[in-house]
Image: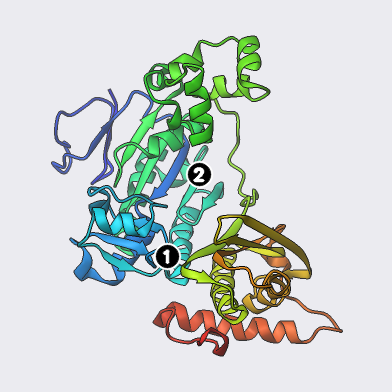
Amino acid sequence: MPSLCRDCFLVADTSPGPRCSGCGGHRLVHHRSLSRLTIAHVDCDAFYASVEKRHRPELASRPVIVGGGTRGVVTAACYIARMSGVKSAMPMFKALKACPDAVVIKPDFAKYAAASRQVRALMGTLTPLVQPLSIDEAVLDLAGTESLHGAPPAAVLARFAISVEQQIGITVSIGLAANRLLAKIAAGRGKPRGFSIIDAGEAAALLAPEPVRLLPGIGAAQANRLEGMGITRLGQLQVLPDREALRKLGDDGPGLVRRSLGQDMRRVDPSREAKSVSAETTFDRDLSDLRDLEQHLWRLCEKLAVRLRGHELAAGGVVLKLKTSRFALRTRAARLPSPTVLPDRMFDLARSLLVKETSGAAFRLIGIGASPLVAGSMADFGDLADSLTPRRAAVQTAIDSLRERFGSAAIKRGRSLG
């Protein structure tokens, strides 16, 4: 069976045994389709926490949680913290109860966006067909690149993973497969620093015993609905005829059955935009004062601007999200006169929506999102009647440059100060 050494990138037609015949390394991958598959899913391991550890090497062996506030949630956790049961989106007080020795670090999205751009730049050297899915994951199509790199995609990806570790200081897990769905599932196997392969011929049998939640797109609500029908494993979906799947599961039923078999016709599309970009925070105590809410809104607008630039997108409008002390959700939206990635332009519009909602109500959460999303190249040009926007853009570019070099605390706007 063909094998790949992930240390020296040697591809052999037959398995050399437990160690590589070239370098003696033991990180070998064996698979019958190793030299034929071209679709890869790259997922950065515990991305935010890994970036923080890169900047603070003394935390390498410590449990790290990225998040903040006793009423907030875990944004990310390193694998050491995960061993204690800490998970993303877990309430912070529960996370600290599970892992009281954890080092808690507030998120620094400018830092994460800079690292994401570095990873994406390395991906761009492999193939032009790179479709970012989020700040820390992307799907690549390496078909036709073997002659360019002088090696099959599997070896190229192993070399890429080492380059990320050496040049950027974080690790990635890679799934190589026959299609995007299987590549994503493969990337989740053996993390961190995983490298897994799934071909079409083995997909159905491999997926059959897995829980339905393994399938991307099946959340808790749909999993509970399927469980109510007695369907808990993907193998139980696989055997449903289209007519029965349509009757039991609705219009998406036949498509769900195909996905449970590992079938996926989606192409890697570098032009495909992210569906949504947003930022939100939960307060330590309920807030009703407009000035307090404005301060949090401004910080979120700065985070949103960083995320938009990381995706090379711009906001055509904003969506304000508020959750009252009684957990009632309010969303308000408005369009911008022209697309932007500037936090002050998004703040000005979002604040006008916020003012209308602050009539004595107390809120436990505030969020800001960009909608609709447009290409970043369309943002902040200004015109004859708007000479201020280009100047704002130049100032923001200078601020971003300083923060990337010296950290997010290197320079602050007066608006962010209490």
Q: Is residue 47 above or below residue 390?
A: above
Q: Are marks 1 and 2 in contact (CB under 8 Å)?
A: no
The amino acid type, in three-letter code, at marker 1 is Ala
Task: Indicate left or right for 16 with 352 as reference.
Answer: left
Q: Residue at x 35, y 45 (%)?
A: 173
Expressed as whole percent of the image width and height from the top left, the position of residue 275 reads 63, 50
| Front residue of 395 and 354 | 354
At mark 2, the secondary structure is strand
Toward the bottom, the furthest residue is: 414
Task: Estimate how packed mark 1 is, as few (under 14), some (14 to 19) or many (20 or more) residues with alpha carbons within 10 Å.
Answer: many
Specify the quadrant that holds the N terminus: top left
Q: Is residue 176 above or below residue 304?
A: above
Expressed as whole percent of the image width and height from the top left, the position of residue 113 reads 48, 66
At mark 1, the secondary structure is helix
Q: Is residue 43 above or below residue 408?
A: above
The amino acid type, in three-letter code, at marker 2 is Leu
Residue 140's disc is 2
- Figure quadrant of residue 396: bottom right
Q: Which residue is mark 1?
A: 115
